[in-house]
Image (tube, helix red, strand yellow):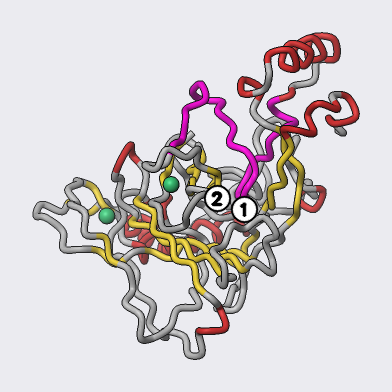
């Protein structure tokens, strides 16, 4: 829907975002990806999380990979209406993969987990410091502040990386099996978004509310894209808008959204390519290609300071 044709004043509140459209694939170091190998030089130290890690139940990444493989195989041979078809061996594998590990003692510093890498050539709305063209996102898959992973960002100039670190570390344990990204290739698409309604000027907001009542359209659903994206606006649908301020006093800007779902029940943001054909397996669900879940199906927003890439980023879960 062309919102700007209905509300020309929205032009002052428009921003582009690049939807990343992750879909399962086999990414290599030169691809923009989620859950793929990173273009990381062998002589650069892999980031480690030095925070205190005291949790109770942990999962192993390899157990989670086994669990997903068993479920994918099982669901792929399960006919519609049937219960999940598993062999005895698969049931045993699933039991093994589903175990929680109780870690009594304090954990040593954990290597960060590779989550995504985005090349500026693929993602027009990617914010990059001068001279760099690649953003690499890693996280410590333990619930740190407010129940979400601790994010680490690394920008670099891809041409500087001649050799790639062969054996890329990963943390031996995760707080949630949903913090392990499934390898996905990206299919970026630029869209225009409009600012969250509560942050618009009052008169415009009132006109939008009247239009919503008259037409039964939902501005919130139409104005801000769902799913993984770079740039664009944040949608404060869980809480009221919360000021994201840098330590320097500057309003921060949304860098990246890590989403649990590519679209929600309204299907507004479901790509034409992902319309169901009736032949896709029930696992994993098409709208959950990365198999990451943040909180109860929320998104993790990563904000940066527009004044300097040196200022620390902030994250918030919504
Ligand atoms: Zn940590
Ligand atoms: Zn700042």
Q: Residues within 10 Å of mark 2 (few under 14, many from 20)?
A: many
Please tell me whether residue 137 is drawn above or below residue 231 in the rendered image: below
Span shown in magenta: 220-245
Question: Which secondary structure lies at badge 1?
Answer: loop
Q: Residues within 10 Å of mark 1 (few under 14, many from 20)?
A: some
Q: Which residue is mark 2?
A: 255
Q: Nearer the viewer, residue 257 or 89?
A: 257
Number of marks in picture? 2
Separation of residues labelled 2 and 1 (CA atoms): 40 Å
Q: Nearer the viewer, residue 136 or 33?
A: 136
* Residue occupying the point 56% across, 71% down: 132
Residue extending farthest left:
105
In the shown orientation, is residue 3 left or right of residue 264? right
Picture quadrant of ligand 1: bottom left
* Residue occupying the point 85% across, 31% down: 4
In the shown orientation, is residue 275 left or right of residue 166? right
Q: Which residue is mark 1?
A: 78
Residue extending farthest right:
5
Horizontal and vertical percent position of residue 221: 70, 29
Query: Taken as a whole, is the magenta stretch helix, strand or loop?
Result: loop
* Disc with the residue nearer the chain's start (2 vs 1): 1
Horizontal and vertical percent position of residue 235: 59, 32
- Is the distance from the Cβ of mark 1 to the nearest ligand 1 atom less than 8 Å? no
* Residue occupying the point 59% across, 48% down: 288
Dividing the image into 4 quarters, which one contains the N terminus? top right
Horizontal and vertical percent position of residue 47: 32, 68
Please tell me whether residue 201 is drawn above or below residue 36 in the rendered image: above
Please tell me whether residue 173 is drawn above or below residue 213 in the rendered image: below
Horizontal and vertical percent position of residue 50: 21, 59
Answer whether residue 228 is magenta in the image. yes
The reply to whether callout 2 and callout 1 are in contact (CB within 8 Å) is no
Answer whether residue 237 is magenta in the image. yes
């Amino acid at each position: 829907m062309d919102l700007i044709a209905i509300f020309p004043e929205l032009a002052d509140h428009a921003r582009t975002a690049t939807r990343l459209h992750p879909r399962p694939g086999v990414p290599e170091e030169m691809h923009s990806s989620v859950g793929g190998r990173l273009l990381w030089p062998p002589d650069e130290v892999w980031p480690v999380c030095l925070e205190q890690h005291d949790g109770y139940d942990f999962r192993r990444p390899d157990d989670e990979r086994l669990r997903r493989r068993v479920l994918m195989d099982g669901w792929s041979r399960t006919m519609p209406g049937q219960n999940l078809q598993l062999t005895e061996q698969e049931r045993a594998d699933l039991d093994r993969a589903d175990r929680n590990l109780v870690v009594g003692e304090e954990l040593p510093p954990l290597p960060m987990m590779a989550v995504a890498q985005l090349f500026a050539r693929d993602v027009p709305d990617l914010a990059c410091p001068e001279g760099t063209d690649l953003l690499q996102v890693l996280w410590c898959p333990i619930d740190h502040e407010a129940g979400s992973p601790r994010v680490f960002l690394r920008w670099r100039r891809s041409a500087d990386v001649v050799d790639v670190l062969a054996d890329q570390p990963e943390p031996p344990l995760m707080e949630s099996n949903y913090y392990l990204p499934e390898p996905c290739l990206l299919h970026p698409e630029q869209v225009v978004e409009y600012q969250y309604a509560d942050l618009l000027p009052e008169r415009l907001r009132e006109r939008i509310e009247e239009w919503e009542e008259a037409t039964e359209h939902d501005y919130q659903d139409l104005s801000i894209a769902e799913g993984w994206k770079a740039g664009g606006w944040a949608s404060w649908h869980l809480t009221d808008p919360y000021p994201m301020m840098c330590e320097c006093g500057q309003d921060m800007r949304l860098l990246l959204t890590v989403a649990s779902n590519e679209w929600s029940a309204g299907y507004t943001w479901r790509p034409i390519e992902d319309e169901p054909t009736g032949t896709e397996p029930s696992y994993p669900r098409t709208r959950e290609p990365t198999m990451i879940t943040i909180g109860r199906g929320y998104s993790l927003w990563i904000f940066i300071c527009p004044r300097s890439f040196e200022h620390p980023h902030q994250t918030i879960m919504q």
